[in-house]
Image (spheres, rainbow, N blue to C red):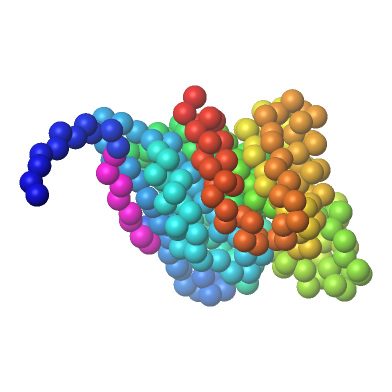
Amino acid sequence: MKFEMNLKIEKPRYFTVSDITYAQVDAWFGHTTRDLKLDLIYPKLKNKKYPCIVWFCGGGWIRLDKSAHFAYLAKLALEGFAVASVEYRTSNEGAYPMPLEDVKAAIRYIKAHADRYNIDENKIGESAGGYLAAMCALDNDKALDVGNYLDCSSEVQACCAFYPPTDVSTFPYESPLTSAASMESLMLGMNVALNKEKAMKCCPVSYVTPSAPPFMIFHGTDDSTVPFSQSAELHDLLEKNGCDVTLVAINGAEHADIFFAQEKLWDMVAKFFKDKLYQ
């Protein structure tokens, strides 16, 4: 069989770049340095720029793998986005605000190199790594911008958070002893049960203002790691401030379980970013 085709160019070509160094940070007790990396999928079509979604892998701030969700990130990319998956320092390397400084540095790097990767630097969204995504979207304190590319803003235009811890003062700890060993205490570098006022200064609910970017929050109703009430509290505060916010309660879902791998959910994520970043 032999036949001819006439094709109309309607879709871009996609490229994947792994292990881009976006920052160098102190390591091994300040005696050495190490690179922080990101992976990037970006579309390329002549004379066109694309919004970028920045993904932060979760893992209790103890461990992460920036490649773990690449199949889902590729789906978002094919919907018309550049997508970056970002490594950040975990709690065994240093306490807050180090991880937040890292993700903000990644956003600045992406904006500084927007032309190289056909990215629209004015249309940056972020997703997952719920706490870091929410904090990055809400806390625009310039003191958190450290390192390179400080002429670029780390602010984002939309945030999609999966089951985010938002208020450590309401976590159900059995005692101050168990609180000391919690992932929240390890990340913040303090026993949150004994330092609630100080810990609240590191919580998303403390930074809600009417100028917050649009939010979409996904949370399982049966989450035993991060109570569903954490997302409900953030939603209610955003709504009270007149912000654009949607909370999707996944009935029967535990923390980060297979419900969050379903196509219908990822279609909602893609639609959210299309609605907010393609305006």
Q: Residue furthest right?
A: 175
Left or right: residue 28 versus residue 179 is left
View extreme (front): residue: 1
Q: Quadrant of residue 190?
A: bottom right
**In the rendered image of this protein, does residue 272 appear above or below residue 257?**
above
Q: Position of residue 7 (x, y in %)?
A: 19, 35
Start and end of the magenta stretch? 12-19
**Residue 155 visible in the snapshot:** no
- List x then y, in percent, for residue 102: 54, 55
**With 194 as the anchor, is 234 left or right in this view?**
left
Q: Is residue 147 above or below residue 184?
A: above
Q: Is residue 33 above or below residue 211?
A: below
Say if 32 sits above or below 11 in the image: below
Residue 18 on the magenta span: yes
Residue at the image point whose x is 7% and y is 46% from the top: 2
Q: Main secondary structure of the magenta part?
A: strand
| x, y percent for residue 78 | 39, 44
Q: Residue at x 78, y 53 (%)?
A: 221
Is 104 covered by the magenta stretch?
no
Please indicate, yes or no, whether residue 157 appears anywhere in the rendered image.
Answer: yes
- Percent of width and height locating residue 181: 78, 73
Labels in figure, total: 0
Which residue is at 79% across, 63% downward?
Answer: 224
Q: Nearer the viewer, residue 202 or 230?
A: 230
